[in-house]
Structure formats: C-alpha cells, structure tokens
Image (tube, rainbow, N blue to C red):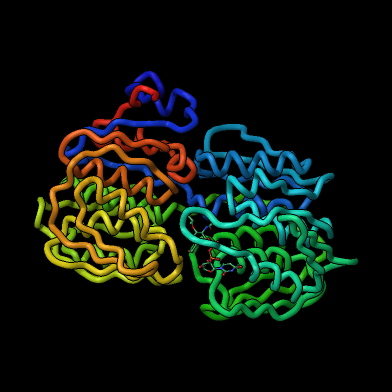
Amino acid sequence: MAATRPFHWEYDAPPLPDETIRIEGGRPLRGDVPISGSKNAALKLLAAATLTGERCRFTNMPEIADVSLMAEVLGDLGVVVDHPEANTYEVSAGDIDWNFVPLEAAAKMRASFILLGPLLARVGKVIISNPGGDRIGRRPVDLHVRAMEALGATIDYRNGYYFAQAPGRLRGGDVVFPHVTVMGTENAMLAATLADGHTTIRPAAQEPEIDDLIELLRAMGAEVERTAPDVIEVEGRRRLRGATHGVIADRIEAGTFAVAAAVTGGEVTLCGAPGGHLGAFLDVLDEVGVEVTGAGDRITVRGAGLGGYVATDIETAAYPGLATDLQPPTGVLLTQASGRSTVHETIYEDRLEWLVDLGRMGAQAEIQDPHRAVISGPVRLQGAEVEVSDLRAGASLILGALAAEGPSIIHGVHHVRRGYEGIEGKLLDLGAAIDRAPQG
Ligand code: EPZ
C-alpha cells in the first residue's frame, strides 16, 4: 500500500517539536477523507483498562500525540501497553506497581486526570498532579475531587498534588454535580464500577464518548447503565475482565473537515463519520447555507464561493448542544458568511482569544467579553504568519489559511498533532498545498 501512496512527510517522518508549516490557500478541497477514532473516547478507554488485570484490546485508535502520551503515562505506572500495529493498542494492567501521575504528564495533557477514578478504585491510593488550566480557561478539577469523596475517598491537596486514598474499598453513593462535566462524569463512573454498592451520577454528561466508554465497561463485566438522558447508574463489582473494543469516530475531526470543505468552496466526503453525533453542528451548517448530503457514516459537504453563506448566531452547550470544540472551526465559517454572526461560548471563559490570531488573516471578529464575540462577513481572508496556542484554535487557523488567498506560515503545529491524526496528509490528499516550512 505504501508503494502507491504519494509521499507525505508527516506520515513518514516523525513530528518535530514546535513544527512550522506553510500553506498556500485558495484551493478548493475535493475528495474523500477518512475520519479517525475519537481522541476524547480513546484516552478514557485506555484509562478504563486499568480497572482490570486482564488484557484489553482497542482498535480504531487515533495515531495522535495525546494517545501516545497516555500510553507512556500508563507505562510509567507499570501497566503493559502494546502497540502491535497502527491504530491498535493492547493494555494489561496486571501489576500497577506505581500510583503516581507526575506533574509533567498533567501539564502536557489535562486528560491524564481521568486516571484518578480507575486507579483509586483499583489500587486504593493515587498521587496525581493538578492538571491546571490551559489556553482555554482555568479548568479546575474540584468536581472530580468531590465525586471521589462522595464515593468514600479522602483527598488532600498539597504542593500541586492530590493525595487520594480509599481505605479498604470505595463505596457506592450519590454523585451530584452542580453542572455537567464530561470527565467528572467519566471519573465518577470509572471509580464506581469497582466500588461496593450502588452509585447514581447526575447530571451525567451525554457526550457520545461517554456512551462509548459505557459500552467498553459493560463488555468488561461492569454493571453500568444510562437510566435517563442525564443519569448514569452503576452497581459495583469486585473485579472486571478484559475486553476488545473499537473506538467510535471523532465527531470534532469530522466537523473540522466539514468546515474545510465549506470555506474552500470544495466538495469533501467524510468517510466513517459519526453522522449521528453531529446534529447540532449540522443544524448550524444548514442555517448558514452549507450544502450537506448523505447521512450516517458518509456525509458530503459542498462549499460555496465567498458570500455564499448567511450569518447566524451560535451558542455552545453540553451535548447534544453545539460542541464547544467545534466553536473555533465554526468561527472560521462565519467569517465567510454575509452579515453579522454572534458567538456565545458558554462552556469556557477563555476560548475566544484565538479570534485575535484569525484577525491577522483579515477576519472581522470583535470579542465583546470572555463568552461572547461578533464575527462580520463575508471577508476574503489573506494568508498570514500565526502562532498556534491550543489544539482546536490551531486546527481552525489551518482552516483559515486554507481559505485565505496567498501563503500562510503556521507555527506550533505540534499542538494540532495532539488531536488530529495525520491532518497534513489528509489535507494534502484533498488537494491542499501544505509543506513543512524551513525551521526558524
Ligand atoms: C472534555 O473536557 C473534553 N476533553 C474537552 O475537549 C471538551 O471541550 C469538554 O469536555 C467539554 O465538552 C476530554 O474529553 C479529554 P468539562 P472536560 O469538565 O471534561 C468546568 C479538546 O479540545 N469544570 O465538561 O475537562 C470547566 O472549567 C478538549 O478535545 C469545573 O468547574 O470538560 C468547564 O468550564 C478541550 N470543575 C466546564 O466545567 C471541574 O471539576 C465543563 O468542563 C471540572 C470542570
């Protein structure tokens, strides 16, 4: 297969730290793009495998930096992680001989905090670094801590680390969150699977990645069920068994490529897409006037020329609302729409800053407060030199560069590799002009 595939440096060369790429924009993207496994499912599935000493096998895993990092963190705990072939991982947590998740893991990836629940349930004692925030807001973990305490754990916080203990065994209980939290729900659910007794979690987040995790847990013998849209109930077991599981497709990657088609005036078919998980986003594309055909796992997006779209108002929300992770890509689309669009980012207090960078390409975006912005269009974006600060903003600056006239230089593309498998190769296959810019 490799012999026929055109050379793509990012497939065949290891990513460099602090990568810089050059994009010549203004080319309509055309063709099929394979959607990879979901980052935000894969990371939790790997963590769930520590709930048993038996081997778990995961297929359709995305080849992204965050998965490699999670595998490394598990390895440091004494967990055996095999990567027998691309997109496949096997995990055997027979001997977890270390229960310390260090600062450098948490600093690089907030999702490492998802190890709190399973390790506490399995080992009974965890020392884990506070992951802190990143570019999109404070992002505390207080709700995770309270959930563990509701299950009988004691947690002290000293010098940036949580010292969690479950004397004897966690016990089932009522976990009540003040508002929806995705990983808070997942940490509580994972811990509850080995707790003694019954646990109820409400309001439980409804993201599809959580239902993917429930499917794995049930295959492992856990008694866990979503008994109402925002309620998850668990009957704890003494032990779980190994299982095999295929990761669901990444709805955020799918949405990102849909915008790539729309803003370059191309025609792209998302293959293996989670069509059923894109409802709110597809509603926005419909409001703006992007032509979408197909359903299920093959969705074709046809773009229009500049001014072919109409402005709309978007508001992010917990699932099934519009995903906050699709807010930055949608912002690029709104620069191409005629009129004044408003963006209301309800989940994070710092996820609109990236619009300043998009402004370097000529976007007319006004940040009114940490949760609101106005984007006016249509604007013909111009190539620019920009620095990526976080994963979704970085992917969105790439979208802007693809739509823009002329060349763009994008620094910090390693942030994008955290969550998008082979993004440069996939874009090259769609006809984009991307190459690795000279370093420095
Ligand atoms: C998950 O983060 C995702 N990450 C995020 O995707 C996603 O943006 C987010 O859910 C919302 O959908 C992973 O799954 C690895 P939350 P999570 O707890 O679970 C506040 C990406 O780009 N909060 O649902 O951390 C929090 O600050 C990433 O793939 C507390 O106050 O998000 C936020 O305002 C970015 N205390 C809100 O709740 C807590 O203890 C919702 O956050 C936890 C969260």
Above or below for 227 versus 32: below
Rendering coords of residue 318 (x, y %): 45, 71
Horizontal and vertical percent position of residue 154: 82, 69
Q: Residue at x 62, y 73 (%)?
A: 225
Residue 264 horizontal side relative to residue 39, left or right: left
Residue name at image x 13 percent, y 57 percent = 378
Q: Tell me if residue 437 comes above or below residue 406 in the rendering.
A: above
Toward which corner of the image does residue 278 lie, by quadrant?
bottom left
Query: Residue most toward the right?
Result: 168
Res. 319 visible in picture: no
Residue 408 figure quarter? top left
327 vs 201, left or right, is left
Q: In the rendering, at what x and y percent does residue 377 appear?
A: 14, 59
x and y, in percent, of residue 20 in the image: 38, 31
Q: Please name the residue shown 71% across and 61% down the image.
A: 117
Q: Quadrant of residue 108?
A: top right
192 vs 8: above or below: below
Any part of residue 362 in sight: yes
> Camera-side residue: 249 or 120?
120
440 or 226, which is in the foreground?
Answer: 440
Q: How many marks?
A: 0
410 displayed left or right of 84: left
Q: In which quarter of the image is the C terminus?
A: top left
Residue depicted at x 24% and y 66%: 374
Q: Who is closer to the viewer here, 365 or 226? A: 365
